[in-house]
């Protein structure tokens, strides 16, 4: 890992609570950072649940991971859990979205709420039929408290769409698919809101590139198009900083989930400049989650060889500015 901009790097746990760990998510509360991921025997096994750990606001060690959600049904049948997404509402609870089901083509959306910043959780609720929730990456909260959730479906063709939640997450509706699945087989979008360039969805694809589309209002999007960034059919995530720059974490490769890179955009996501290499060894370093915390630092988590979750803090002031 390059050390120029990374000011802290650690593993969330050293002794794995389960053999496999993947698909982390990250949020900041008044108590510190909260991370969640799915873990179990292996991806798709029915013992896979959602694990969670916390780190104090001013540093220190991560707490021991604890299991907060499982896929056990009322009749005792077990299904695996998938892809948790944390979101701290500005004037409400900490939300934990995740999926349950036998496979990504047959899973359904779930949500849990915590009113004490992640220490305890209400009973999980199933989202309405046809709603999956944010599929991998964090939603955007609008001024009225509504959520715009980047989502996708793997039922048949891979297609991306956006879901909208109002009334504190009680009223949902889903937008139409943004691609046919033929031009781009795309899933797991991340949603970025630029000060002068509106909304941008950036997506994982099977075409070897990151694809994107644009919207002025968060509801009507342009067609997907290829960007210059490669993508090895693996998850990405990004965030817009307070200074208007964007940070994208992704695998700068067309086939393998290594290396894992950070790119920066200073023009509303039109162009991206790779500026930092987080991992470059052989292995799998994938499915990043990224937020900007209250101190303006970039907080990143990602899968480390399916064995643990790595956490990196980056000072964006040390990131080179794109020319």
Image (cartoon, helix red, strand yellow):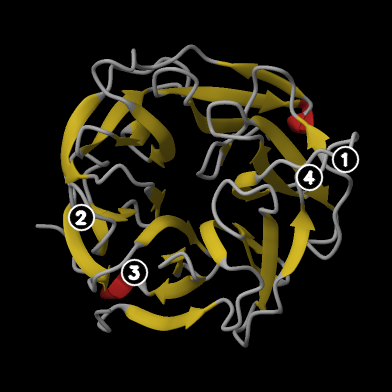
- Which-is-in-front pick, marks 3 and 4? 4
Asked whether residue 89 is in view, the answer is: no
18 shown above or below 152: below
Residue occupied by mark 2: 252
**Labels 2 and 3 touching (C-beta < 8 A):** no
**Labels 2 and 4 touching (C-beta < 8 A):** no
Q: Tell me the distance, in whole angstroms, between the alpha carbons under discs 1 and 4.
A: 20 Å
Q: Tell me the distance, in whole angstroms, between the alpha carbons under discs 2 and 4.
A: 34 Å
Give the mark nearer the N terminus: 1 vs 2: 1
Badge 4 density bin: few <14, some 14–19, many ≥20, Cα 10 Å: some
Q: Is residue 71 left or right of residue 184?
A: right
- Element on which disc 3 rests: helix
Which residue reaches farthest bottom? 60
Q: Position of residue 28 (x, y in %)?
A: 62, 63
Badge 1 density bin: few <14, some 14–19, many ≥20, Cα 10 Å: few
Q: Position of residue 234 (x, y in %)?
A: 34, 46
Residue occupied by mark 1: 76
Which residue reaches farthest left? 323
Q: Is residue 323 left or right of residue 64?
A: left
Q: Nearer the viewer, residue 51 or 9?
A: 51
Q: Nearer the viewer, residue 250 or 265?
A: 250
Residue occupied by mark 3: 316
Residue occupied by mark 4: 112
- Element on which disc 2 rests: loop
- Which-is-in-front pick, marks 1 and 2? 1
Badge 3 density bin: few <14, some 14–19, many ≥20, Cα 10 Å: some
Q: Quadrant of residue 117?
A: bottom right
- Which-is-in-front pick, marks 2 and 3? 2
- The disc placed on residue 158 is none
Q: Position of residue 160 (x, y in %)?
A: 43, 24
């Amino acid at each position: 890992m390059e050390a120029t901009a990374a000011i802290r790097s650690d593993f969330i746990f050293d002794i794995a609570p389960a053999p496999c760990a993947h698909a982390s998510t990250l949020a900041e509360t008044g108590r510190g950072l909260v991370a969640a991921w799915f873990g179990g025997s292996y991806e798709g096994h029915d013992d896979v649940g959602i694990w969670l750990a916390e780190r104090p606001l001013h540093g220190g060690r991560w707490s021991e991971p604890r299991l907060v959600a499982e896929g056990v049904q009322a009749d005792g049948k077990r299904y695996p859990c998938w892809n948790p997404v944390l979101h701290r509402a500005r004037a409400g609870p900490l939300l934990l979205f995740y999926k349950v089901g036998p496979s990504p083509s047959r899973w359904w959306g779930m949500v849990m709420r915590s009113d004490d910043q992640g220490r305890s959780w209400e009973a999980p609720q199933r989202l309405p039929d046809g709603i999956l929730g944010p599929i991998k990456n964090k939603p955007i909260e609008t001024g009225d408290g509504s959520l715009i959730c980047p989502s996708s479906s793997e039922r048949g063709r891979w297609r991306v769409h956006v879901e909208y939640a109002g009334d504190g997450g009680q009223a949902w509706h889903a937008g139409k698919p943004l691609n046919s699945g033929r031009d781009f087989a795309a899933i797991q979008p991340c949603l970025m809101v630029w000060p002068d360039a509106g909304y941008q969805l950036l997506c994982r694809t099977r075409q070897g590139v990151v694809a994107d589309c644009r919207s002025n209002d968060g509801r009507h999007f342009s067609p997907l198009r290829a960007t210059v960034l490669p993508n090895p059919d693996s998850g990405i995530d990004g965030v817009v900083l307070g200074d208007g720059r964007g940070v994208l974490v992704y695998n700068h490769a067309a086939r393998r989930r290594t290396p894992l890179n950070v790119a920066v955009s200073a023009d509303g996501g039109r162009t991206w400049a790779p500026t930092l290499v987080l991992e470059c060894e052989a292995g799998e370093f994938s499915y990043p989650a990224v937020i900007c915390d209250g101190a303006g630092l970039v907080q990143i988590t990602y899968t480390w060889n399916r064995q643990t979750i790595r956490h990196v803090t980056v000072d964006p002031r040390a990131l080179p500015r794109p020319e």
